[in-house]
Image (spheres, rainbow, N blue to C red):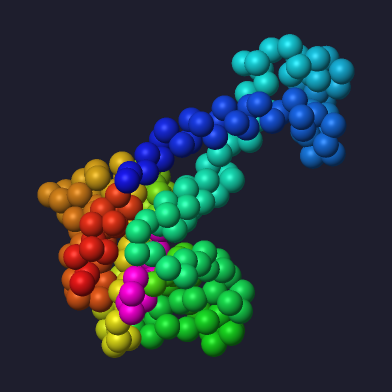
């Protein structure tokens, strides 16, 4: 089993494009059309007619899959479908039910109210037999400021997992996308995913790609 993010992204683009005509009468789409018409000096009806009759122009009003939490959804669906995975959960991204790892200890958001959180909340949890898995997931395609921040988030997450004494618990950083296969700009002699792997203890914390997960889980036992 393998997950191909790029293929799934293209499928979602086509799906979103087909939905545009069905969404023409929604208030959100009407606002979008009116704003576009006002910006470029056209009437609302001209823009609506163009959307109906020109598929290429329709793309302007189609939703971007990357802004629909697509990559997390794909990863969650993939992990849940794997053999041996039980009790899979998408964890809250914030608030009282969010789960964090700080200095080797797990906390809920309620435990950290009014405290600065060094690490971002954990994305997923599940069980394989008696072992509890927690995972931070990133799909990062290109380089840039926001992407570099995601890279830093993963480094902080891994640093916080190293002192964990949680019995039968494994912390994963699932790092997908070509960003992590490119050379680290600071070290220059290793890829970003190689650098991240050096931050783990390979006992309770690990860095893998999602397509390595099934084999990884088999080797846990």
Above or below, 192 against 16 in this view is below
**Residue 184, position as x, y percentages in the image:** 23, 50
Quadrant of res 85: bottom left
Quarter of the figure that contains the C terminus: bottom left
Which residue range is magenta in the image? 128-137
Asked whether 145 or 129 is in front, the reply is 129
Q: Is residue 150 among the parts visible in the rendering?
A: no
Q: In the rendered view, does 43 fall on the left or right side of 10? A: right
**Residue 214, position as x, y percentages in the image:** 28, 56
Above or below, 13 against 167 in this view is above
Q: In the rendered view, does 34 fall on the left or right side of 216? A: right
Residue drawn at x 54%, y 74% is: 98
Check residue 201 for magenta coloring.
no
The majority secondary structure of the magenta stretch comes to strand
Residue drawn at x 84%, y 39% is: 27
Asked whether 47 or 135 is in front, the reply is 135
**Residue 7, position as x, y percentages in the image:** 42, 33
Furthest residue to the left? Answer: 189
Residue drawn at x 37%, y 56% is: 82
Residue drawn at x 79%, y 18% is: 47
Q: In the rendered view, does 194 fall on the left or right side of 129? A: left
Quadrant of res 167: bottom left
Quadrant of res 204: bottom left
**Residue 44, position as x, y percentages in the image:** 86, 22
Q: In the rendered view, does 131 fall on the left or right side of 41? A: left
């Amino acid at each position: 089993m393998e997950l191909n993010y790029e293929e799934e992204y293209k499928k979602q683009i086509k799906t979103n494009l087909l939905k545009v005509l069905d969404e023409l009468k929604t208030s959100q789409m009407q606002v979008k059309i009116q704003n576009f018409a006002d910006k470029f000096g056209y009437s609302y009806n001209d823009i609506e007619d163009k959307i109906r009759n020109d598929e290429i122009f329709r793309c302007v009003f189609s939703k971007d899959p990357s802004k629909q939490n697509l990559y997390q959804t794909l990863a969650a669906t993939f992990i849940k479908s794997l053999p041996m995975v039980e009790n899979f959960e998408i964890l809250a991204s914030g608030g009282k039910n969010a789960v964090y790892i700080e200095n080797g200890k797990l906390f809920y958001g309620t435990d950290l109210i009014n405290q600065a959180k060094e690490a971002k909340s954990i994305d997923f949890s599940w069980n394989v037999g008696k072992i509890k898995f927690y995972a931070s997931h990133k799909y990062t395609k290109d380089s840039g400021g926001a992407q570099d921040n995601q890279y830093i988030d993963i480094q902080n997450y891994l640093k916080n997992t190293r002192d964990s004494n949680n019995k039968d618990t494994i912390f994963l950083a699932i790092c997908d996308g070509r960003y992590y296969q490119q050379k680290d700009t600071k070290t220059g002699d290793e890829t970003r995913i190689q650098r991240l792997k050096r931050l783990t203890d390979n006992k309770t914390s690990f860095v893998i790609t999602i397509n390595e997960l099934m084999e990884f889980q088999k080797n846990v036992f």
